[in-house]
């Protein structure tokens, strides 16, 4: 019996699909604009290119509240540990978009000061090329990420790390005292 | 709030090397030169802070626009006036006199064996940051600087990246299918 | 009377609301203590050092601030920079003069043309070439459009930092128009690499006059909106008037230039004082104010957008005809159509883009007025195809030294407004 013959207003879906739908339609990016790419990232969030229609206009300052880290710009040697710390503070599920060629591979700055690709520090899901990538390119990257979320493994990284990737040692939390 | 429609001011109609002449008179051993229409005075590095004080107090140079240094380790053709002994480093300071609308550049030669010059922060506090940068990237020590620490590189970095004997640390470019050098 | 109380007096005179609440709160602390209350007193004068950044939405890029706090009062602010150090000056020693503009363009990434201009001017001075008038006017127009884009960015981010979040969207709406114009003329929205030694990369496309005037009209309507929204707004005025004060002496001794210096009553603008390009042939005013606070710097940048539009409109009317690059074989590649026809042209093009041209030995310092202040390039050449030293005097690097006098007697809540009004771009701070 097809759904159109059902007189009630309900729909059925697999749980995984609903979870993936929820995850991809409200990805909260963490503010990690470093250099020129940050301006194009802000342009993507602004009125003309409007990330809000994808549910992503809420850039969270706190990495604990963010799902997605868009590394927008060149990562210097001094910034690399900060980047890793912010990534560690994000809770699973989390994704990383490496925006621009400097974040993807060091870009035109092949020297002592720039980390040659942010994938040396954090695992990257989507690389967006460009110097800087225009908002349309970044949007294409974001939609590619949404596709990955739609078709990807739900528990993909949680299995790999004992703490859910959040740099919290669950064993150190004391059990509540019985009163 | 007011706006001002200033007609463009012309530089003082003084002889172009009047400032240079004053510096050379006060600091014997200094050599004046001209570089593409700009006044340059080569001074002894020990006198750098005194020259700055002289420029500020008596020649009305209100601002030290920039302090930097150059490493001439590999420079084949150097443009130096007669009487200036070439050393590996040159500390370059640019000054601007707003009221007189003129600039002057002071260059001091600094030997590689002893890369120390006096700080200008006592005269122009704005040289605090650029002196730290020159120390960080080129290893020139500014004696008397209130905060002689690295400013651009991480605090535990070893070496001075802009020196000519330090490489740029290029990572070889890899192509698809080639073994990863990392 | 302490500085804080003096400010409260002034605020009270200006508005009916808010100031007396602040005053009451601080008085109530004394009342509580006098009544034997439990409010902890800093008998030893203990201060707390907190860290803001480098990853923080309001620090305009990766700026880290160490603030020493006595309760809510900021005793000292120290900026820690270097989180965006890119080794651009080292990279410049490995790139030819033709490639050099791509590198410097990414320093002050909010106004790319200013960086390219100062680099190109330094190279041209060392080469001793004279750029044709049309190229000068095109450069001037692009630099002023870039100034408009940068100040629109300032309006957006400054508004958002102080709390007028919708300013972010309004500022970007107008900035999009300017960026789209850049794409029309140069091919790229940002980091355009359009101003090159010898002139500009390509001539203006057909129909540019209409496009440019359209953009000017759109931006003019936009900034009339910002003016109406913010300038007389009591909340905006309370948050910005009297905050982040700096004096002319403090600016001059710290080598601070640009809108910060002009906000203290010192009307210094390199475009008027030491004109370059064709600034002595166009009509515009130098915008300056007297008080040296955040409000003044906001107003200066707003009015500078208007002055830039005046210059751009004059450029549209008076753009001279002629070459867009100096016709010197040493510096200028042949027109691309000739490459198909002539072997010499092909070889010439090849040599220019692989080896580059050689610049005679020498050194020079060139300065222009970027949206942030005096942007300078100190270049040393040795007769080869790459510079010995290419140092950029980034105005934000020096302007950041203004944080100490401005933030030294402020409240934590104002620290963001103060940093925002300095408008630093970390790309040129750290290079």
Image: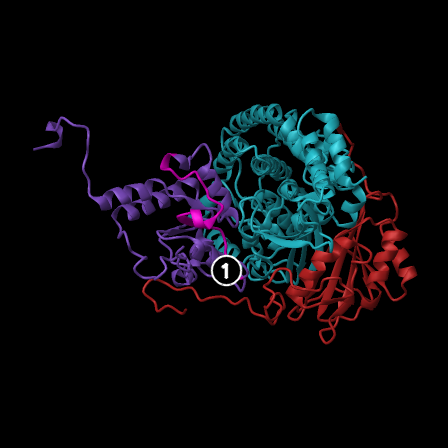
Residue at position x 46%, y 59% in the image: A84
Residue at position x 64%, y 63% in the image: C388
Magenta stretch containing residue A71, yes or no? yes
Residue C332 x %, y %: 56, 49
Q: Which residue is mark 1?
A: A80
Magenta stretch containing residue A102, yes or no? no
Residue C133 x %, y %: 64, 37
Q: Is residue C133 visible?
A: yes
Residue C135 x %, y %: 61, 39
Is C210 positioned to the left or the right of B22 in the image?
Answer: left
**Element at label 1:** helix
Q: Is residue C363 visible?
A: no
- Rendered colour, chain A: purple
Report which quarter residue C378 is drawn in.
Answer: bottom right
Q: Main secondary structure of the magenta part?
A: loop
Is B108 situated above or below C187? below
Chain shaded red: B
User: What chain does badge 1 belong to?
Assistant: A
Residue C116 x %, y %: 59, 47
Q: How many marks?
A: 1
- Rendered colour, chain C: cyan
Region in magenta: A53-77
């Amino acid at each position: 019996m097809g759904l159109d013959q059902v007189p009630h207003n309900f729909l059925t879906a697999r749980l995984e699909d609903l979870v993936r739908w929820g995850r991809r339609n409200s990805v909260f990016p963490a503010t990690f604009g470093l250099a020129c790419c940050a301006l194009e990232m802000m342009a993507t969030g602004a009125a003309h290119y409007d990330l809000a229609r994808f549910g992503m206009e809420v850039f969270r300052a706190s990495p604990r509240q963010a799902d997605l880290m868009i590394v927008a710009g060149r990562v210097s040697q001094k910034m690399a540990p900060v980047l890793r710390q912010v990534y560690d503070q994000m809770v699973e599920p989390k994704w990383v978009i490496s925006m621009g060629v400097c974040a993807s591979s060091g870009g035109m700055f092949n020297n002592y000061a720039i980390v040659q690709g942010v994938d040396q520090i954090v695992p990257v899901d989507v690389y967006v090329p460009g110097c800087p990538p225009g908002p349309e390119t970044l949007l294409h990257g974001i939609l590619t990420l949404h596709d990955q979320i739609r078709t990807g493994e739900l528990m993909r990284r949680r299995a790999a790390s004992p703490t859910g990737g959040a740099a919290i040692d669950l064993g150190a939390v004391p059990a509540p005292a019985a009163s | 709030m007011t706006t001002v429609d200033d007609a463009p001011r012309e530089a003082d109609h003084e002889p172009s090397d009047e400032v240079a002449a004053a510096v050379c008179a006060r600091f014997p051993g200094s050599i004046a030169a001209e570089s593409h229409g700009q006044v340059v005075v080569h001074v002894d590095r020990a006198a750098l802070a005194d020259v700055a004080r002289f420029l500020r107090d008596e020649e009305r140079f209100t601002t030290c626009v920039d302090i930097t240094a150059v490493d001439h380790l590999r420079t084949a053709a150097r443009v130096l006036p007669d009487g200036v002994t070439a050393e590996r480093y040159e500390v370059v300071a640019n000054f601007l006199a707003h009221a007189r609308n003129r600039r002057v550049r002071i260059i001091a030669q600094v030997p590689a064996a002893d890369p120390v010059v006096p700080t200008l922060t006592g005269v122009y506090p704005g040289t605090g940051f650029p002196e730290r940068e020159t120390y960080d990237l080129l290893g020139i020590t500014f004696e008397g600087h209130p905060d002689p620490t690295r400013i651009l590189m991480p605090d535990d970095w070893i070496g001075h990246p802009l020196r000519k004997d330090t490489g740029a640390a290029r990572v070889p470019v890899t192509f698809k299918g080639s073994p990863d050098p990392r | 009377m302490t500085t804080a109380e003096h400010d409260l007096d002034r605020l009270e005179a200006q508005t009916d609301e808010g100031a007396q609440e602040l005053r009451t709160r601080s008085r109530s602390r004394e009342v509580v203590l006098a009544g034997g209350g439990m409010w902890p007193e800093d008998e030893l004068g203990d201060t707390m050092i907190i860290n803001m950044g480098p990853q923080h939405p309001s620090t305009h890029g990766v700026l880290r601030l160490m603030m020493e706090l006595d309760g809510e009062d900021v005793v000292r602010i120290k900026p820690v920079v270097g989180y965006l150090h890119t080794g651009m000056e080292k990279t410049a020693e490995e790139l030819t003069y033709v490639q050099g503009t791509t590198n410097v363009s990414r320093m002050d990434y909010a106004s790319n043309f200013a960086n390219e201009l100062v680099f190109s001017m330094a190279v041209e001075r060392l080469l001793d070439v004279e750029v044709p008038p049309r190229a000068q006017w095109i450069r001037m127009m692009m630099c002023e459009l870039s100034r408009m884009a940068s100040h629109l960015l300032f309006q957006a981010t400054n508004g958002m930092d102080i709390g007028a979040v919708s300013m972010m969207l309004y500022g970007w709406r107008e900035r999009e128009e300017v960026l789209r114009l850049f794409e029309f003329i140069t091919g790229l929205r940002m980091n355009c690499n359009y101003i090159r030694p010898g002139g500009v990369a390509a001539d203006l496309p057909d129909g540019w006059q209409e496009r440019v005037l359209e953009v000017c009209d759109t931006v003019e309507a936009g900034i009339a909106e910002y003016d109406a929204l913010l300038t007389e707004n009591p909340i905006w005025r309370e948050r910005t008037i009297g905050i982040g004060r700096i004096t002319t002496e403090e600016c001059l001794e710290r080598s601070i230039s640009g809108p910060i210096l002009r906000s203290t009553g010192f009307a210094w603008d390199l475009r008027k004082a030491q004109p370059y390009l064709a600034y002595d042939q166009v009509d515009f005013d130098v915008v300056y104010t007297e008080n040296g606070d955040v409000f003044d710097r906001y107003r200066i940048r707003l009015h500078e957008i208007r002055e830039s539009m005046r210059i751009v409109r004059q450029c549209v009317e008076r753009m001279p005809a002629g070459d867009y690059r100096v016709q010197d074989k040493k510096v200028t590649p042949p027109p691309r159509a000739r490459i198909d026809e002539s072997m010499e042209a092909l070889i010439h093009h090849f040599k220019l883009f692989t080896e580059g041209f050689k610049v005679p030995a020498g050194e020079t310092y060139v300065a222009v007025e970027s949206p942030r202040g005096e942007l300078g390039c100190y270049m040393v050449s040795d007769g080869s195809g790459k510079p010995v030293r290419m140092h950029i005097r980034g105005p934000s690097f020096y302007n950041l030294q203004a944080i100490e006098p401005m933030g030294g007697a402020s409240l934590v809540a104002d620290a963001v407004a103060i940093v925002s009004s300095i408008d630093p771009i970390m790309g040129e701070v750290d290079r």
